Amino acid sequence: MGEKEQFILIFTGVWSLIGIIFLMVSLIISSVQKRKAKVCTSKTVGTVVDVIWKSGSDPKYSSWHPVVQYTAATGQTVNTTYAYGTNPSKYETGQTVHIRYNPHNPHEFYIAGDKTAKIVQIVFLCVGIGGILIGVSVGTLVWFLW
């Protein structure tokens, strides 16, 4: 195998692998959201009782997550932190939010109308497609121009 073929194989392979990983994460996020939409059939109104800072490995991956309190149909008061955060925070302490929760597990919930998970899923999808396109495009160009 020549130098050109090795370069194409490695470059295309690495970028395509990165793209596939991002596509898989996008599919997982989508699947989790579809499952939540299916099982979180009970509706209620909750209140943001706090907004907490969750630190990531790098400050740019840190975000504000609302702590939401609501009452389930069973009368159980649920106080839990939303899985998706933003920076800056989308929510303020005292804010009223519409909640969809799982009647069999009231701690499983999402904030109705919140698009954060969908945006994250779309970003991962675009980066995944972009990675594959970069790998294949550059590999093709090198093949014909080298």
Image: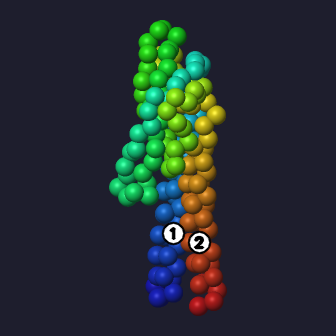
Colour pattern of the rendering: rainbow
Closest to the observer, 97 or 57: 97
Question: Which numbered disc flags the more N-terminal residue, 2 or 1?
Answer: 1
Question: In the rendered image, which quarter is residue 33 located in?
Answer: top right
Residue at which label 1 appears: 15
Tag 2 residue:
134
User: Would you call the spot at circle 2 few (<14 residues within 10 Å), some (14-19), or many (20 or more)?
Assistant: some
What is the spatial separation of the Cα atoms under label 2 and label 1, in whole angstroms? 7 Å
The residue depicted at 63 percent of the width and 82 percent of the height is 141
| Kind of residue at disc 1 | Trp
Q: Secondary structure at mark 2?
A: helix
Local SS, label 1: helix
* Residue found 42% across the figure and 24% down from its top: 79
Quarter holding the C terminus?
A: bottom right
Question: Residue 54 falls in which quadrant of the image?
Answer: top left
Q: Is residue 33 above or below residue 120?
A: above
Answer whether residue 28 is visible to the viewer in this image: no
In contact (CB < 8 Å): disc 2 and disc 1: yes
Q: How many marks?
A: 2
Question: Residue drawn at (53%, 66%), measured in percent from left and top?
Answer: 16
Q: Amino acid at mark 2?
A: Ile
Q: Position of residue 28 (x, y in %)?
A: 51, 44
Asked if one can make out residue 66 in the rendered structure from this viewpoint, the answer is yes
Q: Dot 1: within a 10 Å radius of its alpha carbon, few (fewer than 14), some, or many (20 or more) residues?
A: many
Side of 68 where 143 appears, left or right = right
Image height of 42 relative to 135, above or below: above
Whole-percent x, y for residue 120 in the image: 56, 49
Please determine whether, in this image, residue 115 is positioned above or below residue 78.
below
Q: Nearer the viewer, residue 49 or 33?
A: 49
* In-front residue for pair 105/93: 93
State the image coordinates of residue 88 (x, y, percent, origin top left).
Answer: 52, 49
Residue 30 image position (x, y, % from top left) = 57, 42
